[in-house]
Amino acid sequence: MSLIQALILGTIQGLTEFIPVSSSGHLVLLHRLFGITEGSLTFTIFVHLGSLLAIFVVFFEDILHIVKNPFDKLPLLLLTGAVVTGAIGLAFSGFFRSIFETGQTIGINFILTGLVLFSAEKIRRGEKEIAEMTHLDASFIGFMQSFAIMPAISRSGMTIVGALFRGMDRIEAARYSFLLSIPVILGASLLEIREVYSGALLESINTIPILAGTVSAAIASYFAIKYMLKVLTKGSLAVFSYYVFALGVFVLIDQFFFQAFFPSFF
């Protein structure tokens, strides 16, 4: 992986981690386009940690409150959502891994993300704040988040729309979604680190591209979070659906006719 590729990948990952167009789908897509095979898992771990740093900066007060009051309602709601996602992920880990490794359904998954985002504008705007959430709300959002274990299904898109379905205010939905990414990213990163250093999957690491990608991911994530909070105040999630629809069609055309980057769907 070259330095330029690392900067591009880190920036794209940072933007798409919180803009609801799927960071995992974009990373798979760009790795295929660039022909990157070595060190990809190590790089993915670090750029996700860069995104995590941005969350800590933007939501510093919330995180400080959670640290000081670990048994308050907010941290318990986050725990509920994360446990539901983690339980589903572990139960179906083989299924999710096979989909991620082959990339066979990535085109369809982009389109599914688009349908979910498009449906968000049909939901009546709610007013529920995090303080009014129930653990059933958190469980439903965690369930929606579990679909994003598959590449090209947007984590932020699924969780925000899931929260909107439960009657939450749009800004509060985004706030819960972004905070929920903390245990999810940390948990996924720990599992991936264990795989990388298990021996069989040990990867050679080129430090400079990884550091560059991590920094670019952190900066891009910061601006993506700020942007999404503004979009949810006045804008529409449906605009992102058209973009992922186009990506899905691109991947499906390649799968059906060319197989230049992705394996045949059949």
Image (cartoon, rainbow, N blue to C red):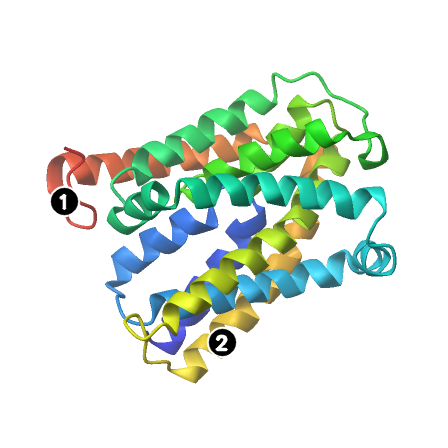
Residue at screen point 39% across, 77% down = 3
Which image quadrant is residue 54 in? bottom right
- Residue 233 position in % (x across, y down): 74, 35
Residue receiving disc 1:
259
Q: Relative to residue 32, is residue 230 depicted above or below?
A: above
Residue at screen point 45% across, 32% down = 113
- Residue 15 position in % (x across, y down): 54, 54
Residue at screen point 70% across, 51% down = 226
Q: Relative to residue 155, is residue 184 depicted above or below?
A: below
Residue receiving disc 2:
212
Residue 236 seen by the camera: no
Specify the amino acid type for callout 2: Ala
Would you call the spot at circle 1 few (<14 residues within 10 Å), some (14-19), or many (20 or more)? some
Which image quadrant is residue 186 in? bottom right
Residues at marks 1 and 2, CA–CA distance in whole angstroms: 31 Å
- Residue 131 position in % (x across, y down): 85, 35
Is label 2 in a helix, a strand or a loop? helix
Is label 1 in a helix, a strand or a loop? loop
Seen in the image, is 2 located left or right of residue 157? left
Specify the amino acid type for callout 1: Gln
